[in-house]
Image: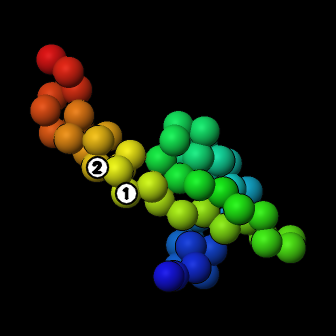
Amino acid sequence: MASVSWSSPVVSTSSTTHLAILSRAGLLTAEKAGRNIIYRAIPQSVREMTDYLLAGCGS
């Protein structure tokens, strides 16, 4: 597992905001670990979203 904060040029507060939005959308889980939050993708949810987008967003 890679650390997003070390591999991304995005500012920390921006990445935290984006990850929180993805978590609320059901695409990630969020687990508090001390001062950090560990985000993990939910593969089935990501797959369903990808399928939806590839199918033309329901059109």
Residue 1: % across, % down: 50, 82
Query: In the shown orientation, is residue 22 left or right of residue 33?
Result: left
From the image, tell me which residue sits under label 2.
47
Would residue 57 be seen by someone viewing this image from the given angle? yes
Residue lying at 59% horizontally and 46% vertically, measured from the top left: 23
- Say which of 14 and 45 sits in front: 45
Residue lying at 58% horizontally and 79% vertically, measured from the top left: 3
Residue lying at 16% horizontally and 39% vertically, measured from the top left: 54
Which quadrant of the figure has residue 53?
top left
**C-alpha span from label 1 to label 2:** 6 Å
Query: In the shown orientation, is residue 19 left or right of residue 46?
Result: right
Residue 28: % across, % down: 53, 53
Which quadrant of the figure has residue 40?
bottom right
Check disc 1: other Cα within 10 Å, few if <14, some if 14-19, many if 20+: few
Would residue 18 be seen by someone viewing this image from the given angle? no
* Whether residue 33 is situated above or below residue 48 in the rendered picture: below
Per the rendering, the mark at residue 43 is 1
Query: In the shown orientation, is residue 17 left or right of residue 34?
Result: left
Check disc 2: other Cα within 10 Å, few if <14, some if 14-19, many if 20+: few
* Whether residue 45 is situated above or below residue 56 in the rendered picture: below
The three-letter amino acid code for the residue at tag 1 is: Pro
The three-letter amino acid code for the residue at tag 2 is: Arg
Residue lying at 51% horizontally and 41% vertically, measured from the top left: 26
Residue lying farthest to the top in this orientation: 59
- Quick one: SS at disc 1? helix
Per the rendering, the mark at residue 3 is none
Marks 1/2 in contact by CB < 8 Å: the verdict is: yes
* Whether residue 2 is situated above or below residue 11 in the rendered picture: below
Q: Quadrant of the C terminus?
A: top left
Residue 31: % across, % down: 71, 62
